[in-house]
């Protein structure tokens, strides 16, 4: 079992561009959450997907959107990138919606210039 | 609103000495508390959760609802305990709330030989 996999691992964008990050959950997991981790800070919840629907959302603007596919994989999209969007984006999966035990990927490091 | 505070950014201890990582939280309902750990070049992973009441790798943590704290302790630190530690909070067993975790800012532990 490869666990949670994310792609790409690193990417560089310029202000105003759009980015799509991808995540495949751990085998058997149906719930995917996305977190943003700025340098020197703890992860901050963006949103959670279950049954292809956004179930919860953190304090992030509408520029951040997502999707979950029937195979439980997920995408995070960020439009109109700002310098402040530079961060490590972590995907986490869990066995069920209410389980606080999350399995994290290694993250996608986004740099916005 | 949920909030988790880890007052120490860095803890440096000698091998064999006790180590205690502080975590304070604020939440109006009943929380579930977690400690996550990230070792060098590894992904973020669950260390322990308060409802399991387990000792993992010699670490224990007690939920003190009166003091709204969930401090992590180990009586004899080992060099392999050097890592980044994050305290996290989730609403307790509310299915609709899913598993939105609120993380603290993290504490880096350095165990010196």
Image (cartoon, grey):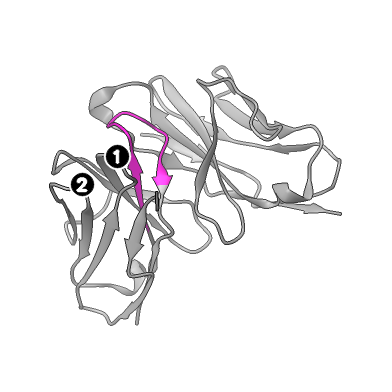
Instruction: Mark 1: give few (<14), some (14-19) or many (20+) Cα within 10 Å.
Output: many
Q: Label 1, on which residue? A: A29
Secondary structure at numbered mark 2: loop
Q: Label 2, on which residue? A: A72
The chain carrying label 2 is A
Please tell me in which quadrant of the rendered image residue A24 appears.
bottom left
| Residue found 53% across the figure and 21% down from its top | B52
Q: Nearer the viewer, residue A111 or A100?
A: A100
Please tell me in which quadrant of the rendered image residue A62 appears.
bottom left
Q: Are marks 1 and 2 on the same chain?
A: yes
| Residue found 17% across the figure and 48% down from its top | A71
Q: Is A20 within the magenta? A: no
| Residue found 26% across the figure and 47% down from its top | A47
| Residue found 22% across the figure and 53% down from its top | A74
Q: Position of residue A29 (x, y in %)?
A: 29, 39
Q: Position of residue A105 (x, y in %)?
A: 40, 54
């Amino acid at each position: 079992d490869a666990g949670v996999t994310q792609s790409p691992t690193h990417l560089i964008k310029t202000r105003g561009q759009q980015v799509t990050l991808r995540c495949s959950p751990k085998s058997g997991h149906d719930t995917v959450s996305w977190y943003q981790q700025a340098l020197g800070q703890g992860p901050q919840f963006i949103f959670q997907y279950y049954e292809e629907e956004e179930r919860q959302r953190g304090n992030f603007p509408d520029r951040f959107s997502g999707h979950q596919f029937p195979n439980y994989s997920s995408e995070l999209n960020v439009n109109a990138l700002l310098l402040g969007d530079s961060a490590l984006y972590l995907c986490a999966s869990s066995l069920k919606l209410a389980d606080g035990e999350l399995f994290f990927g290694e993250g996608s490091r986004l740099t916005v210039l | 609103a949920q909030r988790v505070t880890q007052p120490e950014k860095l803890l440096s201890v000698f091998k064999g000495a006790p180590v205690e990582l502080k975590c304070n939280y604020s939440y109006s309902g009943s929380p579930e508390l977690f400690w996550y750990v990230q070792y060098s070049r590894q992904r973020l992973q669950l260390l322990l959760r308060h409802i399991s009441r387990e000792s993992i790798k010699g670490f224990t943590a007690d939920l003190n609802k009166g003091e709204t704290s969930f401090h992590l302790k180990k009586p004899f630190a080992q060099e392999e305990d050097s890592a980044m530690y994050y305290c996290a909070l989730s609403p307790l067993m509310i299915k609709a709330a899913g598993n939105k975790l609120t993380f603290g800012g993290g504490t880096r532990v350095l165990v010196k030989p």
